Amino acid sequence: MTQKKYVYYFGEGTKDMKILLGGKGANLSEMTNIGLPVPPGFTITTEACNLYYEVGQKWPEGLLDQVVENLKKLEKEIGFKLGDESNPLLVSVRSGSAFSMPGMMDTILNLGLNDKTVQGLIKKTGNKRFGMDSYRRFIQMFGDVVMEVEHSKFEAAIQAIKDKKNVTLDTELNAEDLEELVANYKAIINKETGQEFPQDPIEQLKMSINAVFKSWNNKRAITYRNINDIPHNLGTGVNIQTMVFGNMGDNSGTGVAFTRNPSTGERKVYGEYLTNAQGEDVVAGIRTPKDLDQLHKEMPEIYNQLIDIFNKVELHYKDMQDMEFTFQEGRLYMLQTRTGKRTAAAALQVAVDMVNEKLIDKKTAVMRVDPDQLNQLLHKQLDPKAKEKAQQIAKGLPASPGAAVGRVVFDAETAVQESELDKVVLVRTETSPEDIQGMAVSQGILTARGGMTSHAAVVARGMGKCCVAGCETIKVFENEQYFTVKGVKVKKGDWITLDGSTGEVFLGQISTIDPEISGNFEMFMKWVDEFRKLGVRTNADTPKDAEVAKKFGAEGIGLCRTEHMFFEGVRIKAMREMIASRDVEGRKKALAKLLPMQKEDFIGLLRVMDGLPVTIRLLDPPLHEFLPTDEDDIKEIAKELGMSYAEMKATIVSLHEINPMLGHRGCRLSITYPEICDMQARAIFEAAAELVKEGKDVLPEVMIPVVGIVNEVKILRQQIVGIAEEVMKENNVKFDYKVGTMIEIPRACITADEIATEAEFFSFGTNDLTQLTFGFSRDDFGKILPEYLERGILEKDPFAVLDQKGVGNLIKIAFEKGKSVRKDLKVGICGEHGGEPSSVEFCANQGLNYVSCSPYRVPIARLAAAQAAIKKEENN
């Protein structure tokens, strides 16, 4: 039986083998194959790492034999031998997963040194200081990474010697100082672990490989994968590579460089280096690195070689590269290349430049940019340098990106008042629709409860406001006007800063920087639309939101939430009057006051969209949400409405429901109170009629929410169509319109063929559909979400990323059943998933007509839709 191959010598693999060899291993093989000066070595596969975990943290059968076999091959190629006292081979042992995870896993340098081989190294190089410096570095790194001795113990030991010698830098210690440090380091390991530092190089190698395998599941690596949506089952490769030394004197050094500027995308090499140093010195910041331009003056030959290599590698990979290099006594070696991480602005600049340079085509450029990165271009950001020095006090969910700096307020009314004097951040246990005005005037919103699709999150994204939601560590005392977190008390008027892109909360003010939307953005988005097939609409409730979305390329409104229009001054009073009315006539009288206001709202939206479809959802939330809960507010409203306190209180009690999300809401309101539907439909169609008279194009779409039974649609459709015909006749105009439904109840998905006989379009409300499919409360789920993610019960938050197996399958069923009855059925989604890239891709692949998302996510959805179309074409 053929032995499974777990080890690949550099040159046996290619850059396309990242899943098996990890990014570093695949690229080291590729660099070797194209003739770059790469120190030889070999890679243990990610498959071996995964098997190591599967069999109880033991090496799979055959791995040790293959490591030894490739080690002998390496020794033969370079003429050095691991453990040889006169001609010792030293190697580095480095991690490397399929996706770049900088600094998250472990590395060991100078492996192979012991008390005897270090003497051979000194004799061979004639440089005792170099030998002892390399040995102390190895012991420190091995002790920290492999034997789990606290790094600070070693730092204290080297600092003690520097203090004794009255020097500042490591490079100021002589050979004897470093020899003393070696002895001290070994003593620290013995004291902390009860074990001697291992002298057998093969044992050192085996222990180091184990440590790299284990580092795949260290806390910081798991956290990084969670943040960056990297699967946890990929494993890491292990790269064993011949050491080259940047710490052999002033003609040696090490550095890192990008082939283009990673912040701006400028076509100019960007990098840093240190002389007489090893790689970790650049990263650790022990010494200040020099700009790569300085190398041109100090060592022009090395610099020119580097530039030639950078050009060659970028031409080969056809992308910006992030490279590590070392020069040893005037000879250059390349240690790594990977696709360079870059800002959104740089990503666009590089993509556009490379198309203009004919290095890549437009399709490749569109696939290069991460859709979520576009967030950086559309929202204010915290100044990274100022953020580094700030005091982080809490972290919640990054519900809406951007930055917010303001004084803390705890209620909407105060927010409105204080915002006239200074910038404010609204802090709430959770928000409700009544907070809308406070949210509108606030720089950002912070809530202790709620998830990525909570009220605060959804509204904030719609407004383009920064929001941190579900920050469970803060305790909000709204009446007392303060919140506490980790022993810190933050009072009304204190300054805080929110980072909506990361969920971080900081004490005090952090300076912000404006995003720069360049001509590259417009050009790039034109390319995006050349490939995109899926339509992109927006969720917008105001003309201002609609204008923002249209500027970002929205092709209509996929969801207008009419309930958000009722929470202002005279409107809320009329709404409450309608709710408190004892009979139909009373309700009609109150609704008559709302009709002209609703009509003006719809005129504004239809005018902005200028002939593009505008989907208007009829009233959705239960009526109790429009009524107060505070006793003083109840008394005040009773007085305003000419009612007694007891009558008002009785009305509120009568509307109370055990589970309002499943109660008297959506289409059920319109069926039991048809006058509400009458008013809204009339407002929509009168707005359309008025604009048609002005010569404007309009396409209103009336959406019936919370439907589960075809007869609900049938009854309301007849009512809506009747009003449309009546309005057109009264105004002597004609216009197109549609009546459809929001699909957010599982029964609606299963009976979609029946519903489609009455509905002209389906719009999946994926927030509620997810809630009802899982049986999770979307506002409370945040309490258990971390546990579900950590234990692998869920891979991702289903309210942030569409659950394709469950909710997605229901969408597929509904789509197919609906289309079987009505071939021209328009189908889209309007939940927050409409702006999440993987969810957009799912919708594109299912054949939906459009997705709808908050205005500031429209470009993200456009890019995700284009990438989905390109992938589908390539796979077919």
Image (tube, rainbow, N blue to C red):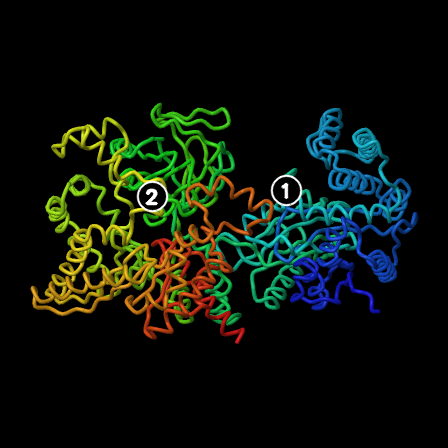
Residue under the image location 39 percent in, 42 percent down: 467
Q: Which mark is residue 550?
A: none
Is residue 706 found left or right of 31 in the rendered image? left
Q: Neighbour class for label 2 at 10 Å: few (<14), some, many (≥20)?
A: some
Answer yes or no: do the residues labelled 2 and 1 have beta carbons within 8 Å? no
- Residue 177 seen from this side: no
Q: Which residue is mark 2?
A: 660
Q: Quadrant of the N terminus?
A: bottom right
Residue 657, position as x, y percentages in the image: 32, 40
Disc 1 element: helix
Q: 578 left or right of 363?
A: left
Q: Quadrant of residue 555?
A: bottom left
Q: Nearer the viewer, mark 2 or mark 1?
A: 2
Instruction: Tell me the quarter of the picture where residue 760 sits.
Output: bottom left
Which mark is first along the chain, 1 or 2? 1
The percent coordinates of residue 309 (x first, y second) are 65, 63
Left or right side of 119 for 184: left
Q: In this orientation, does residue 788 appear?
A: yes
Question: Percent from the top left, x then y, of residue 725?
Answer: 13, 66
Q: Nearer the viewer, residue 715 or 849?
A: 715
Three-letter amino acid code at disc 2?
Pro
| Residue that badge 1 annotates | 219
Label 1: few (<14), some (14–19) or many (≥20) C-alpha neighbours in 10 Å: few
Between 572 and 658, which is closer to the camera in this rendering?
A: 658
Residue sitting at x 23%, y 61% = 715
Give, as a three-letter code, the residue at label 1: Lys
